[in-house]
Image: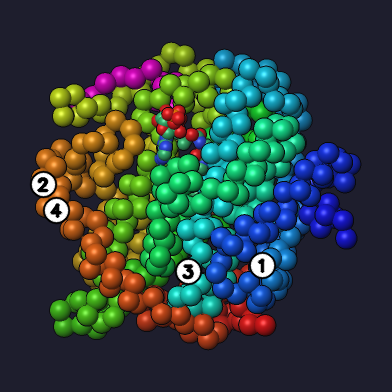
Amino acid sequence: MQLFEKIPNNVNLSQNKQLVRALEKWQPNYLKWWKEAGPSDFQEDLIYLRTAISVDSAGWAQFDYVKMPDYRWGIFLAPPEHSRQIPSGDLYGKPAWQEVPGEHRNALRRVIVTQGDTEPASVEQQRLLSNSAPSMYDCRNLFQVNVEEGRHLWAMVYLLHCYFGRDGREEAEALLARRSGDQDRPRILSTFNEPIEDWLSFFMFTMFTDRDGKYQLLALAQSGFDPLSRTTRFMLTEEAHHMFVGETGVGRVVKRACELMKQDVNEDARAQGGIDLPTLQKYVNFWYSSSLDLFGGEISSNAADYFASGLKGRDREESYSDHVALVGTYEMKVMDNGVPVSREIPLRNAMNEVLRDEYIRDNERGVARWNKTIRESGVSFEIKLPDRKFNRKMGIYSGYFFDPGGRPITEAEFVACRGEWLPSEADRAHVMNLMQPVLEPGKMAHWIAPPLRGIHGKPIEFEYVRRA
Ligand code: BYC
Ligand code: FE
Ligand code: FE
């Protein structure tokens, strides 16, 4: 079978010989990368996976057993909107671009490469997790996330190959050459070089970091470059499942922690072989603060330029009345002699912060659901998102120290309390120690509650992973 027939797509691939040639050259390198840097195990086994074969509601949810290297990574764009216009910025209301505008070529390529880089990075970070899956159900969800992140890489490579000529092809190769955590050729953004060695971190990552993905994709869905907008809109349909895995994953650890607390005279979940809520809170603090960094600087001329030129917009741009944002300010806390003070920032320069606000609100809804579980089990504990200034490595708060409530403190105070706020070596060792694989259908590791239901109407004890 010819390659273009193997790639499900709605971009008329078979009619575009040049694109097919570029993809045919790239695809073997992609598979080599997948085998080298993708899931360390189960590559020859049958996994019950969802594959998108078209963009309508029936077509993007086909479930069947597949071997991961045989997964049909497709190229899908959301259907075109009739005479779509640039939704924001200086060119608000002009027809959206169907080709790359020359003056924005470099900026656009850069945004696409940055987005594309995170997709394989996350697969690399999660490479070893199937060794310690808490259940077959979870193992399958991990692989579903992994193959879809692989597809998201395809989505960005499609744009690079189709619209950026030779340098696009070079960037597509470079996306396969960088490696998460590598000293010499790391991934571009900070969080994507953090190791994910245990399943609590995986659930935190899919809760908090995939949700950055959601918001960046929402901003790119408002791009004036129509192929990017349509590509990211389809990616968002898959992203929902990744965050489901994260939110319900953490939720099940919370539920189990509460059950174990009730079984212990000292309400100590750790003593009962679970993950205690204070440890879970530290993982929240770590992954949430790291993911906040992914939105870029609070005051950013890059963000202003992206907005002005119509490359990136705001989440739900249609809900705003002013789509140009040349007037108006955003009030934020900036550091002045080590103290946060309020200042008005021109709105366009605060676009990263506008998006971060939406992201924070979305997380708060998820955390509220975890806290409801805790309340209902009669345990007194509240999971809290730390203040946005806490433990930041990028932006105006980096280099300063804050407690999780957002109060400025000294470095010495931070260092003294670090082990109470962020996972300590001992916490990590405890969590790692619990990471023993449980792969009989329907069985769950001791530290996590079962899910409410299985995948795609299948029972929880369904054989989601079938050893060949
Ligand atoms: N780490 O003006 P600034 C996903 C750089 S996740 C390292 O503050 P700007 C997924 C920045 O590049 C979504 N470097 O920020 C999730 C700039 O470099 P230069 C991924 C960073 O430009 C889970 C400098 O610092 N998509 O899809 O507004 C699993 C100052 O820039 C970081 C995107 O990110 C950082 N955290 O950048 C799988 C969308 N933050 O100019 C997938 C595309 C900033 O000094 N990216 N820098 O060399 C963008 O739109 C923007 O690049 C950013 C913010 C949102 C990252
Ligand atoms: Fe993705
Ligand atoms: Fe994702």
Which kind of residue does numbered mark 1 sit on?
Answer: Met
Which kind of residue does numbered mark 4 sit on?
Answer: Cys
Q: Is residue 181 above or below residue 436?
A: above
First in residue order: circle 4 vs circle 3: 3
Q: Is residue 358 above or below residue 151?
A: above
Range shown magenta: 341-352
First in residue order: circle 4 vs circle 1: 1
Which label was assigned to residue 129? 3
Tell me, yes or no, whether the two marked residues, 4 and 3, touch with CB atoms within 8 Å: no
Residue under label 4, please give it. 417
CA–CA distance between discs 2 and 3?
35 Å
Name the spot of residue 271 as percent of width and height, x first: 22, 80
Residue under label 2, please give it. 413
Name the spot of residue 334 as percent of width and height, x first: 25, 26
Tell me, yes or no, whether the two marked residues, 1 and 2, touch with CB atoms within 8 Å: no
Name the spot of residue 239 as percent of width and height, x first: 56, 52
The residue under the point 26% across, 45% down is: 391
Any part of residue 55 in sight: no
Q: Secondary structure at mark 1?
A: helix
The reply to whether the magenta stretch includes residue 342 is: yes
First in residue order: circle 1 vs circle 3: 1
Q: Is mark 4 within 8 Å of ligand 1?
A: no
Tell me, yes or no, whether the two marked residues, 2 and 4, touch with CB atoms within 8 Å: yes
- In the picture as drawn, the residue positioned furthest to the front comes out as 184
Which kind of residue does numbered mark 3 sit on?
Answer: Leu
CA–CA distance between discs 4 and 1?
44 Å
